[in-house]
Amino acid sequence: MNEPIQFSVQSLLSQRKGVIHGAMSPLLFAKEMAESVAFKYNRVARVWFKDERINQHWEDGGLTGHDTLIIGMQYANDLWLSLWVDAGVGGVPVAMALQSDGIVDVTGVYRETVYARNLTDGEIKEIFDSIFANPALISIKNDEITSIPAVPPADENNES
């Protein structure tokens, strides 16, 4: 019996003073993929796997450091997710899913790409289902800096 996949999701977008920002490389990748496939997005997150072989190639005796990214669109009443492997130069679309229809569409390109370990259809569905169950995982973080009020100086004439 296979062990359940162990992963975590890290939102990569944050907002400060109304401006959205995030890590340069994943955001450039998301922008490039969105332009090439003609989709809109407002969520970007990284998926970390305990099994470091997932979506990696063996190269020079070690594993590549490809990112596995969620690029998605949060709508008022729905959530669309796409899973990608950022290969440094270009990317591999893994799968897409719309929360309201519950269907995960794994791409033929991903099925044909050989990694040290590919995700199974069930594992991909598990990743999407975990985000659908908790969309806050990929929410835009608020980076507003809150100031801490200064402590007023002690009144020399009024000792406690």
Image: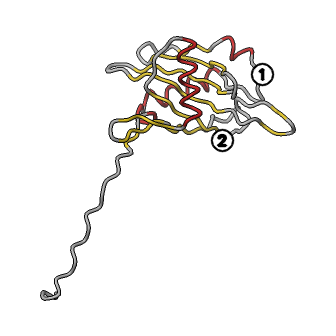
Read off the residue under disc 1.
114
Q: Quadrant of the N terminus?
A: top right
Please give the name of the residue rendered at 48% of the width and 23% of the height, measured from the top-left corner.
72
Q: Residues within 10 Å of mark 2 (few under 14, many from 20)?
A: few
In the displayed structure, 152 sits above or below 76; it is: below
Pointer 1 local density, CA inside 10 Å: few below 14, some 14–19, many at least 20 = few
Q: Which quarter shows the C terminus? A: bottom left
Q: Tell me the number on the disc at residue 50.
A: 2
Colouring chosen for the image of the structure: secondary structure
Measuring from the top left, give residue 17's x and y in whole percent: 33, 40
Q: Residue at x 58, y 13 (%)?
A: 36
Cα separation between marks 1 and 2: 19 Å
Residue at (78, 30) in percent of width and height: 57
Q: Secondary structure at mark 2?
A: loop
Per the rendering, the mark at residue 75 is none
102 is higher (above) or lower (below) than 20 = above
Name the residue type under label 2. Answer: Lys
In this rendering, position of residue 96 left or right of residue 3: left
Q: Which residue is depicted at the point 25% across and 71% down?
A: 151
Q: Secondary structure at mark 1?
A: loop
